[in-house]
Amino acid sequence: MAANVWRVSNVMVNRYLGRPPRYLPVILLFVTDRCNLRCRMCGVCEREGTQDTSGELTTDQYKAVITSAATRLGTSLASISGGEPLLRADIFEIIRFAVDAGISTHICTNGLLLNRERAERLRDAGIAAVSVSVDSPDASIHEYLRGSGTFQGAVDAIQLLRDTAPDIQVGINYLITRLNYRNMTDMVAYAERLGVQQIKFAPVHANLLHRLKAKSELDELYFAPEDLADLQREIDRLKERCRTTWLSTTSATFHDGIVSFYAQPRKFKCYAGYMVCAIGPAGQVAPCCDMDSPFSVQDRPLDVIWRDPAFHELRRRVDRCDVPCWDTTNTELSLRLQPRTLLRNLAANWRDLRFYSGTRGRRANKRENTHE
């Protein structure tokens, strides 16, 4: 804990001074572009060659990335995503290697590929937390967004994890769209009944992993100016409901910026490239997954790239970035580290830390199950 506090403090100081940080606390590993679904909002599937595995980093290359992060950059958390990361046959070996290196590991999944064997392998690999996408307590809305049969598949995955691996922390990722924003408050209660430990709400966006999606294809999901007053009322209801839940959830500061994201996006000091960096399926390293980069771990070790003055020029682009952004990784992390909100978010930060480090264990699960 003391080491993590020191590393984060070092990053914060260097961020405000505009200097390269010594440490890299969080790595985002996008291990594949392949996916078993074609969700309406997702831009990953728009990329060419998404079913081709030939360009993906190998198991040994991921082990080299993890070793570099753990031993030379002080990384304490790896968040694994895709595509659908469970499509990689070696994903359990990658997770086990990261855990053995001292890095808490979290994975995002749609849940459809999670059977008992894979749940047990995640448990045995030592994963700390799993987040499953569920976009409404109403199956028809979720399945309109993600496909037929996906709602029960996601719910079954959550229940399977709770039964098979109760020490794994389980969260829900909820994408806010015009089709489901009136279900947000009900979703908190539904998440409580499912017995998860976290629920994160993020507004639908056209950048980051979705930047290749044609804007016209997002029209029915995006909020129009005439929707914003009603959206604000629902966000206010959500904030009140989140104050009464034991679940780890998105911060009030983050909720406060959701409506303005569609009207006049707020500026904030972003920690992309300082607290966190993204590593793509082929090894490309960038401060943010919304940014192209010439750097790759196939050419040089991660720690060498992280400290390269040329990579710091990409961090300077983060300072000049004018792309509207309000996501639960870079935006939420950056908001929580702002001096004026750091104290306000201490409790939320502590709950998230326990979630991603998997330290709540069986006692917390047992306590939460009494609410069902």
Image: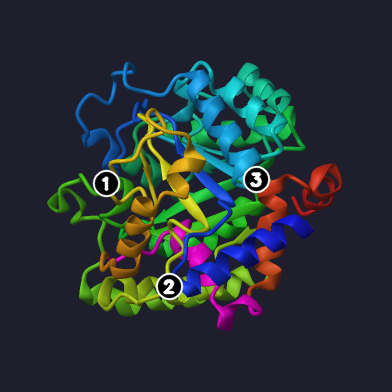
Residue 218 versus residue 63 in the image, above or below: below
Residue lying at the far left of the rendered structure: 216
* Quadrant hosting residue 97: top right
Residue shown at 71%/27% (left/top)?
123
Residue shown at 55%/51% (left/top)?
24
249 or 27, nearer to the observer: 27
Q: Can residue 246 be seen here? A: no
* Quadrant hosting residue 160: top right
Judged from the image, the secondary structure of the residue bearing numbered disc 3 is helix
Image side of residue 352 versus residue 280, left or right: right
Q: Can residue 353 be seen here? A: yes
Residue 48 position, x and y percent, is 19, 29
Residue shown at 41%/75% (left/top)?
268
207 or 56, nearer to the observer: 56
Image side of residue 166 versus residue 226, left or right: right
Question: What crowding class fits label 3: few (fewer than 14 Cα within 10 Å), some (14-19), or many (20 or more)?
Answer: some
Which kind of residue does numbered mark 1 sit on?
A: Asp
Which kind of residue does numbered mark 2 sit on?
A: Lys
The residue that disc 1 covers is 292
- On residue 269, which mark appears? 2
